[in-house]
Amino acid sequence: MPNMTSESTADALMIEARAVKKRFGHNEVLRGVSLSVARGEVVAIIGPSGSGKSTFLRCLNHLETIDSGHIAIEGEALATTDAQGHCRYVAEAELRRICAKTGMVFQHFNLFPHLTVLENLIEAPMVVQGVKRDEAVARAEALLAKVGLSPKRDNYPARLSGGQKQRVAIARALCMQPDIMLFDEPTSALDPELTGEVLRTMRELADERMTMLVVTHEMGFAREVAHRVAFMDGGELITARPAAEFFADPGHERARAFLQHML
Ligand code: ADP
Ligand code: MG
């Protein structure tokens, strides 16, 4: 683990969320969530359905706007809240540039059905980053090899298994060369026999020291791959402690009850 007490703490912090609040109408979905993630760290977020896990992840790359609190990515603020409680986002261009540092993988893959696997991968680099086609294809081919799907290069998503679709989705996110990967229940839509191949790909990324925030119900993955486990319940992040410590003793009654239910 990085040395969190050193002077360089600020630039080692890849994600910093402080007192993040978010409501949908009268429903206060995030009630002051704080979490910092260091470079190369893998943090698993667990917790019951409806506890705000997806919303929190979506706030980190501006798929949702927050009502108050602070969010910074690699030391650059997306949103800050002043003493009067006014929340301000940075300008649109800045926001886009900062959010490009994070890649996201969703439960339901969200591949473009009318594009081949290769086209799914090169679309965003070409359109969003202005990368030349040859370079985008080279990136895509390297990533397809990495996730073991080179032979599927010219297939359409409908021809792939769920596990293959999710590995394509991971490769597609990596094609944008993010520094941080956010995963929202990446294996929850998969048949049990297909989760292994996706978790293996994620484990390889973790071994390469990718910074990862992973919402998951896979306790084995959380225990073996995550450095820390964060438990959310009722819009609060109750605890975030080293994985071994968490599984030995989550330290909070609600976390203990949840864990008992999951294991
Ligand atoms: P989790 O991922 O932990 O299951 P979510 O973040 O998806 O939880 O949802 C937290 C709460 O926010 C739930 O009560 C959910 O119904 C609500 N919610 C999520 N997204 C929206 C939305 N776009 N509009 C209104 N309510 C939402
Ligand atoms: Mg969710």
Image (cartoon, grey):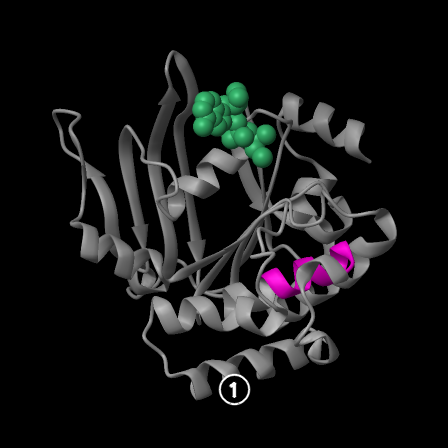
Q: Secondary structure at mark 1?
A: helix
Q: Percent position (x, y) of residue 169? A: 60, 60
Above or below, 97 against 89 in this view is below
Residue 68 location, quadrant: top left
The residue identified by callout 1 is: 138
Above or below, 28 against 2 in this view is above
Residue 248 location, quadrant: top right
Q: Nearer the viewer, residue 160 or 203?
A: 160
The residue lying furthest to the right in this view is 193
Q: Percent position (x, y) of residue 28? A: 41, 18
Q: Is residue 165 magenta?
A: yes
Q: Which residues are magenta?
A: 160-169
Q: Nearer the viewer, residue 238 or 17?
A: 17
Look at the magenta stretch and give its main secondary structure. Answer: helix
In the drawing, does residue 94 fall left or right of residue 51?
A: left
Give me the residue at 13% from left, 29% from top: 83
Give me the residue at 12% from left, 24% from top: 84
Q: Percent position (x, y) of residue 54? A: 52, 37
